[in-house]
Image (cartoon, rainbow, N blue to C red):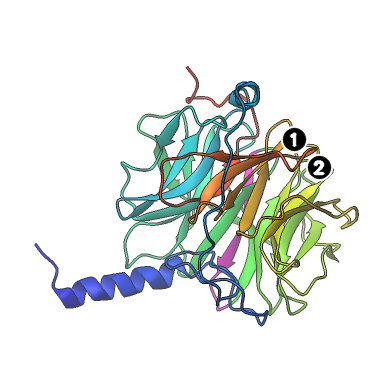
Amino acid sequence: MTLSFTSQLRSLFLLAFFLAACGPQATVTPALTPNISNSPTPNPVAGRPSPTPEPVATAKPEVAVELAQLGWITFSATEGGRRDIWVIRPDGSQVLNLTGGMRNIFAEAPVWSPDAGLIAYDGITSPESVRDIYLMAVESEPSQTTQLTTQLGFDCYPSFSPDGQHIVYMAEHNGNRELFIMDLEGNDLLQLTDHPAEDYEPAWSPDGERIAFTSRREGNSEIFIMDADGSNLVRLTDSWGLDWRPAWSPDGEWIAFESWRSGNADIFIMRPDGSDLRQLTTSEAEDGHPTWSPDGRYIVFHSQRTGNYQLFVLEVENPEEQWHLETGSVRALLPAWSPVAVVPGLEG
């Protein structure tokens, strides 16, 4: 049965509302970049047109050989009116759609379990559904998916504990965004934060002792860290621009994050106490959402350098060495590198 124009318009309106639900609310920072339509993690400010595409490089053959040995990168990509969870080899040699056969119209923010056997992500199955967290078994064919959250409201930004038994995530059930921990059956075990400001984007440390996250409790989005039980809260960043999307290095010695402190989105790293701040990217395009390779040598991130969101890789010790990772998608973003070099179910 064909929907009427009014019904189609209503569905599109509802979908746009739900897609925006887990992004941060508007800030008071100066107007710099446009909001990207249908993005659940929109740019924090608006005003500048899309960047002019920049020349991009691909990895040299010897580097590509090294990258090919470092597992897989999962990411969210748009194709045919859907947004799905994909994986790609770090050298670009293989690309697979993991959720293309599932009943969903939107899936993003994927993260790996410590053994890379599972991927958790945010999902919406219809314009009338709320945003929930799903768990997907990577090695099953077709991929088996379990819905972990079912409450009214929005549940987003999952991150696994190092033992793979729990997930920390953001929930907005009563008009505010707080952090919770649940087990792999979706049972809420602990509410970590309780503050009138927004708390979101948690990232569990490799040793399991701490959780980094983004919060607006000081007025602007900054990165905080706390013990895994919610105690000993410490603020790590303090800048006029947005600081968010923290990601731990595999050895726990560094936190990578996206910052707008320079007037544009760039990739920075710092120590877990906020010291030794280093800026890794300086492109005029928006660079964001960094995650580390399993050996800690590289960082994958998304960027608008091509005129649209695409994936890029940089070498941490030589950050001027950066390469475009061609996915074939018109919009690829929010990458996450597998924590192990061999991913069950994707090898061979």
State whether residue 22 is above or below residue 210: below
Given residues 338 and 62, the one toward you in this image is 62
Tell me the amino acid under the disc marked 1.
Gly
What range of the chain is rendered magenta?
164-175
| Label 1: how many Cα within 10 Å (few below 14, some 14–19, many 20+) | some
Mark closest to the chain's N terminus, 2 or 1: 2
Residue 218 on image: x %, y %: 78, 77
Query: Residue visible at 63% across and 55% down?
Result: 287
Identify residue for label 1: 296
Q: Quadrant of residue 283?
A: bottom right
Residue 113 on image: x %, y %: 60, 38
| Residue 168 painted magenta | yes
Identify residue for label 2: 252
Mark 2 vs mark 1, foreground winner is 1
State whether residue 199 is above or below residue 308: below
In this view, which residue lies farthest toward the top? Answer: 348
In this rendering, position of residue 33 left or right of residue 308: right
Query: Residue visible at 34% across and 57% down?
Result: 125
For the residue labelled by badge 2, is the local secondary structure a helix, a strand or a loop?
A: loop
Q: Do the residues labelled 2 and 1 touch (CB within 8 Å)?
A: no
Residue 93 on image: x %, y %: 48, 27
Which quarter of the image is occupied by the N terminus? bottom left
| Residue 59 painted magenta | no
In this rendering, position of residue 219 left or right of residue 134: right
Query: Residue visible at 51% across and 31% down?
Result: 92
Given residues 102 and 227, the one toward you in this image is 102
Tell me the amino acid under the disc marked 2.
Gly
